[in-house]
Image (tube, rainbow, N blue to C red):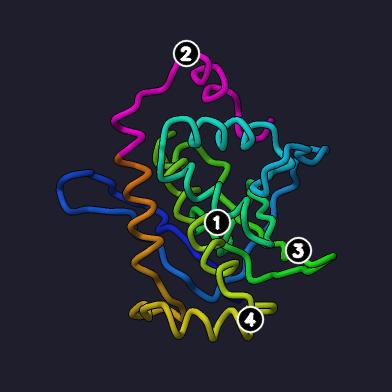
Amino acid sequence: MLSTALSKTPQHVVGRGLTLSIVAAFLTPQIMPASAGADEASSRVRSTNPVILDLLKEARDRSATFRTLVEAIDHSNGIVYVEFGYCAFGHLDGCLLPIIASTHGDRYVRVIVSPEKSRLNHDQLLALIGHELRHALEVLEHPEVVDVPTMENMYRSIGTPIAGQRGFETSAARSSGTAVLTELLRNTRAPQYLEAAARPFGD
């Protein structure tokens, strides 16, 4: 299956040449159950998990790049759900699932990020979500992508094959993740975000 994923043990050092290393790979994700209740906000970037909703709001407030990604998705015909879960049986920290559902002219895609705080620090998690949103936007920017085969064909066209893996990476997604992380490090968290960041991911 086609997915985008972050390596299990990332090293992020802004300004030292190390950037988010995320690949599009054919993997089997495992979905974690989310809390009930869908996001009723007008944004097309949504979640059923209140913790992720807090993360999305914080990232929009602290990162102009993240905010631009959300606005672009909001002006598309797509709806992106971001949820906690496991990709590649827990070996990867995030993925874009190879599933596109269409209804009433909208295309739905789903991003999964690891619920384990030990794998990424807070800002790295936000940057990972930003990277995955760029991959979601890549899909939504191509109206011909309506299923897994057309998604694969698109990534063969716009992506770079990853050595040793059945997958692809794009410079746009890599740059977006790096830009988000850089902006987050420049804009420290406001007090109202500290409480939310301390809440368990499973809540």
Dot 4 amino acid type: Glu
Give the labeled residue for mark 4: 144
Give the labeled residue for mark 3: 106
Q: Residue at x 54, y 86 (%)?
A: 153
Q: Residue furthest top?
A: 191
C-alpha separation, residue under disc 4 versus residue under disc 2: 44 Å
Q: Is residue 178 left or right of residue 202?
A: left
Q: Is residue 187 left or right of residue 43?
A: left
Residues at marks 2 and 3 touching, judged by CB atoms closer than 8 Å: no
Give the labeled residue for mark 1: 90
Q: Does 68 sit above or below residue 24?
A: above
Dot 3 amino acid type: Asp
**What is the span of residues highlighted in magenta in the rendered image?**
183-203
Residues at marks 3 and 4 touching, judged by CB atoms closer than 8 Å: no
Q: Residue at x 57, y 62 (%)?
A: 96
Q: Residue furthest front?
A: 75
Of pointers 4 and 2, the one earlier in the residue sequence: 4
Q: Is residue 189 magenta?
A: yes
Dot 2 amino acid type: Pro
Q: Is residue 58 left or right of residue 17?
A: right
Assign a secondary structure to mark 2.
helix
Local packing at callout 4 (Cα closer than 10 Å; few below 14, some 14-19, many 20+) is: few
Q: Nearer the viewer, residue 23 or 67?
A: 67
Assign a secondary structure to mark 1.
helix
Front tag of 4 and 1: 4
Give the labeled residue for mark 2: 191
Residues at marks 4 and 2 touching, judged by CB atoms closer than 8 Å: no
Assign a secondary structure to mark 4.
loop
Dot 1 amino acid type: Gly
Of pointers 1 and 2, the one earlier in the residue sequence: 1
Of pointers 4 and 1, the one earlier in the residue sequence: 1
Q: Residue at x 56, y 32 (%)?
A: 57
